[in-house]
Image (spheres, grey):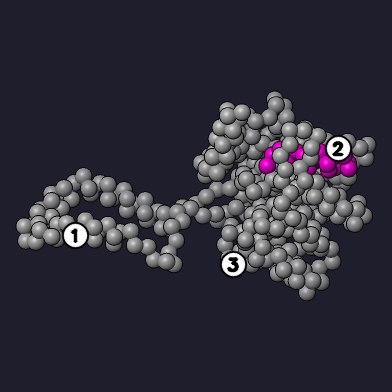
Amino acid sequence: MRKCIAFILCLLALGFSPKAVFGDYFTDISHGFALGEVQELLVGERVVPIIEVEPQTPLSQGVAVILVEPFLSSFSLSQSKELAGYLSEKGWRVVISPFNFNMLPTKSGIESANTSGQGADDQGGNNQGTGNQSTDAQAAADPSAAEQAPASSGQSSSVIHPRSTNLTQYFDFEQTSDKLTEQLIALNNRLQNVQGYRLVVAQGMLAATFLDATSNDVAFEPDSLVTISPYWPQADVNKSISDLVANSSFPVLDLSIDGLSDWEHSTVVMRRNRAKTSLKLHYRQVLLPSSNSVFSLNQNQKTPYIQLVANNTIGWTRYLGW
């Protein structure tokens, strides 16, 4: 029992580690499934893993693409496969396509790195001579100054402005949209001969990025989109999501999970009102509860979160007449 608890704690620690999330995400996916279960998709010069689930009915509804993020708050691969099982029972061919985000260094991060590097070099050179001489001179002139100098210098270096930021990395929205566009092109080329409807399911930051990519190129527009708590951790981009939803030419099912993200929560009413005032033809917003996570050793126990998403998605397709 103790070994199991220790193993779970190690997995959680690795999950919250940025290096674990952004280090070698695609390689972990390829090694985490049985041989032949993961297929390769060539995206430019990169190889991206995908998982395909065949429909379980004689007549196929079409293709449902599930875009997966490398975040704990989003669809995990196991949850995506569970949702794919629900959709395949209704005649959908499901393609699970993981997507990895790239973090860029901020200006402050670059400056701090350069400053720390220069400081390390200078500390081993000139500071050893001039610093010791000035300290000795001050100590000879005023003994109390020698005791106060280290404390005052430490205090001045530790003072941080209340409106300053200590972020050293960030997500670039335009670069992420361009990268997703490349992956969508590869997916379209792979699925161009498959007949039926095109359904896309995306959550969080990836949902916002997909809306932006389809607004720039109509070739990526699906027959319907299911967004799950779309947001982007930048104020101006996050506010523009409501306009992207309202101006989209395809039906949108907007699922909002309570408490998943404060960024998303701030635009829930905005998205609904913007779609109403713009007279968007097919739009539905559904609020899902946040307390829907359970743990069970029973393999037949379905995740309530995935059940809610699957039932609303299937009901949405029935509403569209598919």
Residue 214 horizontal/vertical position (percent): 71, 57
Element at label 1: helix
Q: Name the residue under label 2.
A: 55
Residue type highlighted by circle 3: Asp
Q: In this view, does 224 lie above or below 81?
A: below
Residue 159 horizontal/vertical position (percent): 34, 62
From which residue to which does the magenta span run?
Answer: 76-96
Mark 3 or mark 1: whose residue is earlier in sequence: 1
Rate crowding at label 3 as few (under 14), some (14 to 19) or many (20 or more) other CA atoms within 10 Å. Answer: few
Dividing the picture into quadrants, the one containing residue 83 is top right
Residue type highlighted by circle 1: Gln
Left or right of 156, for residue 192: right
Left or right of 150, for residue 52: right
* Residue 65 seen in the current view: no
Q: Mark 1 points at which residue?
A: 148
Mark 2 or mark 3: whose residue is earlier in sequence: 2
Residue type highlighted by circle 2: Pro
Element at label 2: loop
* Residue 229 seen in the current view: yes
Task: Please report the residue visible at 67 percent of the width from the left and 66 percent of the height from the top.
Answer: 267
Q: Is residue 166 above or below residue 179?
A: below
Q: Name the residue under label 3.
A: 236
